[in-house]
Amino acid sequence: MIDKKLLHLLGNNKKYIFMAVGLMLLGLAANISITACICWCIALLISNAEASAYLLPAVCAACAMVVRYCTTRWVGSVRDTLGREAKKDLRKQLYEKMVRLGVKTTDQMSMAGLTQMSMEGVEQLDLYYSSYIPQFFYAMLAPFILFAVTVGIQWRVAVVLICCVPLIPVSIIAVSKYAKKIFAKYWGKYTSMGDTFLDSVQGLKELKIFKADAARHEKMNESAEEFRRITMKVLVMQLASTTIMDLVAYGGAGLGIAMAILSVTKWGLTPVMALFLVLVAVEFFLPLRAFGSAFHIAMNGASAGKNILSLLELPDPEWGDKSLDGTNLALRTVTFSYDGKRDVLQKVDMVFPETGMTAIVGESGCGKSTVVSLLLGVHRPQIGTVTAGSMPITQLSRESYYGSLAAVSYNTYIFHTSVRENFHMAKESATDEEIYEALSKVNLADFIRENGGLDKVIEEDANNISGGQKQRLALAIALVADKAIYIFDEATSNIDIESEAIIMRNIKALSRQKSVIVISHRLANIVNADHIYYMESGEIKESGTHTSLMQQGGGYAKLYTAQKNLEQGYKEVRE
């Protein structure tokens, strides 16, 4: 009933569990003391004792009540601390895991699922840790303590009560398999509903354009209805199991009370002792009854916890501890497959010198982006090595490698903050003059000056600027970062031809001092590259300068000619 992996996530916070259980047991002892004092007073009353005789049991009862009150308050405080610390540590572990994964994505989890896991999932585990686990250990210990107290009074009653106690865990186990299936589906439906909602909100403009919002609305309603149904199944299961546990608890307590009364008439037990057994009989079952109620919380928390564990157990990218000793990159006989079945890259050899512009071109699906992912450390090749300087990147420290590399793609993220702050993330010491110089290089300085300057706030997902302006801004930020290696992956795909020409001139100028790698579908952008790799079906078919490749008359020449003719025809149509 306790998931060891989830318990291991608590780390040093396990001490709060022991504190909570210890205080709960102290509270149980106080309850037993209060009951004993009440029975003591009744015995004194029956024997017509003097008033002064009531003083000691009254004082003991008062002290026990104070202890009971304090332990109740302290248990609540410790549980609250446990839950709060557990949530803080879990979110810290999740964040650190995402940082360690770096540019590697979690392919098994959507953005909505990742968000729900780190927020709602952690909240559910808070209840699992603070309510379920302490109650589990308390429920296991309390009946044995009560048995030790009552067995000396009347062993038959104590045996009957302790034998009835396991019926509650049996009833819990009976529904646990069914409960696990329901809660696994519950969390899946919850995540699915979140995915559908987030997807619909992000694509609302397109839904309106294609008049598909009504159909999407129906899909969202279906997802919500599926979640409602699984929620009702959860509630029905909880109600049924609670009813079963109530029958077992009160039935067992009733049987113990009957045995206590029978002991008075048949085995000579005194009425006062019988009263004590009657009063404590229910205490045998209350801890497990409360544990049974917390069981449903645990199932939900455990389902969420498995998703958290699946992320935390993802293998970290392999990195070493050495410093980069050169900025020339290379792929050495690299073969790579995403699924282990089909090779996306086959025995690829590429060299990217410390200075100069190297281009990788080819039709869609030829493996260009996969090469970039390998250079960025997102994936590692099954065969061959990716080297930087004189050693494989797996031997380098992540900080050293990424400290020398900048990547700009068609979907580079711009943060929801001012233009200046976005630049300061790349280079904290960047001055306004440096920033405007970089903006000028991408033909964006005038726009920024006329629209709020460097204090202009970029909205979420850069919604208040165009796609081309977003890419140019990302490019300018990369230029300010002043890295030794630059990778441009379709960095000019949404930019007008005039701005594109300006940017490519700046990229070429940058390559005189830096190592520049350019991925582009538009071959006109890379005619000035120092070296070009032309790829087909995951292999390098041709390599050389633009002039030499055109002279070969191979695949590159045909692709370049086809694009040039297409652009010329488009230009003639416009004119």
Image: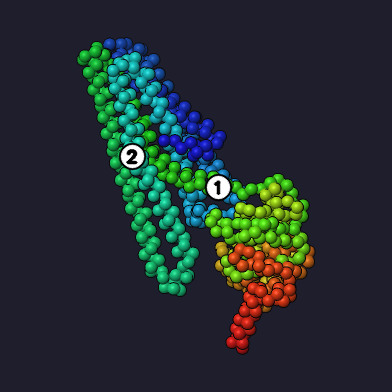
Image x and y of residue 195, in percent: 45, 58
Residue at (26, 19) in percent of width and height: 260
Q: Is mark 1 on a helix, strand or loop?
A: loop
In the depicted view, which residue is nearer to us: 420 or 173?
A: 173
Residue, disc 1: 314
Amino acid carrying label 1: it is Leu
- Foreground mark, 1 or 2, reads 1
Is 127 situated above or below 549? above
Read off the residue under disc 2.
Answer: 175
Residue nearer the viewer, 498 or 249:
498
Of residue 45 and residue 2, the one placed in the foreground of this image is: 2
Q: How crowded is mark 2: few (under 14 residues within 10 Å), some or many (20 or more)?
A: some
The number of numbered badges drawn on the structure is: 2
Residue lying furthest bottom: 575
**Residue 415 location in percent, x, y?**
61, 60
Crowd rating for badge 1 (residues with CA inside 10 Å; few <14, some 14–19, many 20+): few
The reply to whether callout 1 and callout 2 are in contact (CB within 8 Å) is no
Q: Is residue 93 above or below residue 381?
A: above
* Res 91 label: none
